[in-house]
């Protein structure tokens, strides 16, 4: 019995350790993003820019999908020494199921393009093409919490059953904090999209062209009790368009703010038919940041899904936290 107790505590401790490590890496990216705003800059040149795809699948169910990633190599010189960086953002994700994200990077960082690079004066090999804070920075600390918080909850639950330690209130409070924090993040991201969508109605417009279009499909498999496997396919229509502002060629892949990434049925095909390759389009762009643009300005119905889900999770978490006071 004592051996089982040690194994249980040890296993849960591994989850906690992984969570702490990932969260620490995420905080490091946030710190670097903040610090990079004040770093000196130098003009670099893109040496390599390519998109790769890696197929993933489950042998048991046959479900298949693909992850797309862009590899960007930027050469720059500081104090007479040559350096190369592949970091365009701190906290950048390795890949995505949205092929337009990788294609957008490849187009923005085409070989031979001059790029402004911010570098750390203490270690010039540490450099970034897009300094500052970005949404991708949330993934690592989020993954860290995804390991740490459930591990801590299971540890508290185990201690409550294996010992006389009373942790019911703490477990419920932690459970509420998780949902409230997740809801707050989703609500913040959703409200930011709503603000941009509202503002885009008054943005200046220019003419652009669809330069990339693809329907990305992924299979999902669900086991049922009798041993059969039910498969479903989700599709996402993704486009990249080019436009000129301020004498520069720019690219974006935002069709509308708050757009749904994937769905079933004919939804993806309808979007692909609406925006075929080579078609001229009207592009609304943010005058404060011309790289931020949208094809369909204004607030669409789907833009309310993320802030709505965030508000629901936040209220649920607050309710659980309130109820935990009675334990």
Image (cartoon, helix red, strand yellow):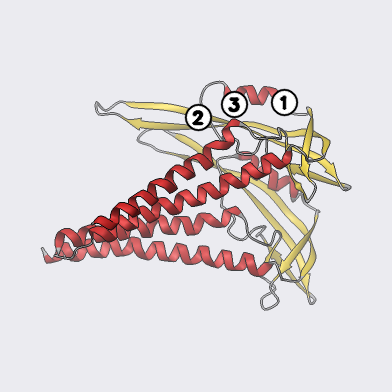
**Alpha carbon separation for disc pair 1 and 3:** 12 Å
**Mark 1 lies on residue:** 276
**Alpha carbon separation for disc pair 1 and 2:** 20 Å
In x, y percent, where is residue 46?
Answer: 76, 56
Q: Quadrant of the N terminus?
A: bottom left
**Who's the residue at 76% across and 49% down the image?**
110
Location of residue 255 by image quarter = top right
Disc 3 secondary structure class: helix
Q: Are marks 1 and 3 in contact (CB under 8 Å)?
A: no
Query: Is residue 7 toward the left or the right of residue 132 in the image?
Result: left
- In the rendered image of this protein, does residue 267 appear above or below residue 195? above
Residue 253 appears in the picture as rendered: no
Location of residue 125 by image quarter = bottom right
Mark 1 vs 2, N-terminal side: 2
Disc 1 secondary structure class: loop
**Who's the residue at 65% across and 70% down the image?**
35
- In the rendered image of this protein, does residue 240 appear above or below residue 13? above
Query: Is residue 139 toward the left or the right of residue 324 in the image?
Result: right
**Who's the residue at 79% across and 67% down the image?**
42
**Mark 2 lies on residue:** 234
**Mark 3 lies on residue:** 268
Query: Is residue 232 toward the left or the right of residue 165 in the image?
Result: right
């Amino acid at each position: 019995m004592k051996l089982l107790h040690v194994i249980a505590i040890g296993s849960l401790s591994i989850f906690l350790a992984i969570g702490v490590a990932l969260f620490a890496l995420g905080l490091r990216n946030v710190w670097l993003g903040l610090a990079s705003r004040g770093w000196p800059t130098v003009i670099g040149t893109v040496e390599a820019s390519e998109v790769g795809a890696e197929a993933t699948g489950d042998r048991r169910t046959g479900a298949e999908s693909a992850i797309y990633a862009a590899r960007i190599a930027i050469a720059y010189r500081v104090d007479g020494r040559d350096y190369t960086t592949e970091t365009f953002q701190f906290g950048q994700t390795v890949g995505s199921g949205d092929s337009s994200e990788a294609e957008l990077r490849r187009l923005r960082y085409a070989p031979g393009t001059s790029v402004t690079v911010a570098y750390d004066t203490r270690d010039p090999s540490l450099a970034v093409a897009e300094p500052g804070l970005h949404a991708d920075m949330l993934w690592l600390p989020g993954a860290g919490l995804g390991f740490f918080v459930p591990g801590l909850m299971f540890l508290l639950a185990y201690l409550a059953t294996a010992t006389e330690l009373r942790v019911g209130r703490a477990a419920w409070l932690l459970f509420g904090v998780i949902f409230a924090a997740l809801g707050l993040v989703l609500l913040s991201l959703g409200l930011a999209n709503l603000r941009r969508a509202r503002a885009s109605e008054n943005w200046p417009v220019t003419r652009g062209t669809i330069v990339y279009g693809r329907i990305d499909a992924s299979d999902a498999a669900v086991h049922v009790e009798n041993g059969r496997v039910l498969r479903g396919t989700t599709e996402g229509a993704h486009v990249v368009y080019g436009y000129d502002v301020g004498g520069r060629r720019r690219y974006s892949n935002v069709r509308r703010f708050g757009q749904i990434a994937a769905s079933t049925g004919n939804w993806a095909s309808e979007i692909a038919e609406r925006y075929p390759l080579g078609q001229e389009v009207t592009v609304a762009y943010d005058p404060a940041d011309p790289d931020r643009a949208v094809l369909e300005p204004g607030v669409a119905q789907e833009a309310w899904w993320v802030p709505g889900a965030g508000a629901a999770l936040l209220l649920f978490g607050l309710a659980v936290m309130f109820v935990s006071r009675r334990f």
